[in-house]
Image (cartoon, grey):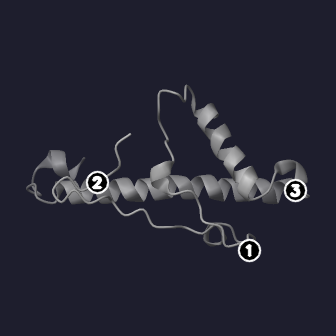
């Protein structure tokens, strides 16, 4: 899978390092979250969204907390929800950055460029 890059300069789109303690309020360890560029949200090997969410959930359970060890299901699911939403927000931000960098040289009055 090709990495997101600026097609004029060839430079990759920034993929900042995120610590889990910045995503999850109750997570105290300084653990780096898997870089966005290493998370394949679509691939032929993932036949369904359920398979991908299971992979991400397993990753969450490995680095944060297995569900069976949680004493509070509501807190556990809330943390998982924030984890998933962070992954989605990071990808959205990187794709928007990629789009802006790669359409900056086009006329801004072109509706195909402005509307994506």
Q: Which mark is residue 8?
A: none
Q: In the image, what residue occupies the spot 88% across and 48% down? A: 68
Dot 2 or dot 1, earlier in sequence: 2
3 w.r.t. 9: above or below: above
In the depicted view, which residue is nearer to us: 55 or 75?
Answer: 55
Q: Which residue is label 3 attached to?
A: 70
Q: In the image, what residue occupies the spot 8% across and 56% down? A: 107
Horizontal and vertical percent for residue 93? 40, 59
Horizontal and vertical percent for residue 27? 73, 69
Dot 3 or dot 2, earlier in sequence: 2
* 4 relative position to 104: left or right: right
50 w.r.t. 88: above or below: above
In the depicted view, which residue is nearer to us: 41 or 45?
Answer: 45
Horizontal and vertical percent for residue 63? 72, 57
Q: In which quarter of the image is residue 26?
A: bottom right
Mark 3, Cα crowd under 10 Å, few <14 / some 14-19 / many 20+, is: few
* Disc 2 to disc 1: CB gap under 8 Å: no
Q: In the image, what residue occupies the spot 61% across and 72% down? A: 22
* 3 relative position to 49: left or right: left
Q: In the image, what residue occupies the spot 16% across and 60% down? A: 104
- Label 3, secondary structure: give it: loop
Dot 1 or dot 3, earlier in sequence: 1
Q: Distance between the residues labelled 1 and 3?
A: 16 Å
Q: Which residue is label 2 attached to?
A: 5
In the depicted view, which residue is nearer to us: 35 or 115?
Answer: 35
- Label 2, secondary structure: give it: loop
Mark 1, Cα crowd under 10 Å, few <14 / some 14-19 / many 20+, is: few
Q: Distance between the residues labelled 3 and 2?
A: 40 Å
Q: Which residue is label 1 attached to?
A: 28
Mark 2, Cα crowd under 10 Å, few <14 / some 14-19 / many 20+, is: some
Q: How far apart are marks 2 and 1 (CA)?
A: 33 Å
* 95 relative position to 101: left or right: right
């Amino acid at each position: 899978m090709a990495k997101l890059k600026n097609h004029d300069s060839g430079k990759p789109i920034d993929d900042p390092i995120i610590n889990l303690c910045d995503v999850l309020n109750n997570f105290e360890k300084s653990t780096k979250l898997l870089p966005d560029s290493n998370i394949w949200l679509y691939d032929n090997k993932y036949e369904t969204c359920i398979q991908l969410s299971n992979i991400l959930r397993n990753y969450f359970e490995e680095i944060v907390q297995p569900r069976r060890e949680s004493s509070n299901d509501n807190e556990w699911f809330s943390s998982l929800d924030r984890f998933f939403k962070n992954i989605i927000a990071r990808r959205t931000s990187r794709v928007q950055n990629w789009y802006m960098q790669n359409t900056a040289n086009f006329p801004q009055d072109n509706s195909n460029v402005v509307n994506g």
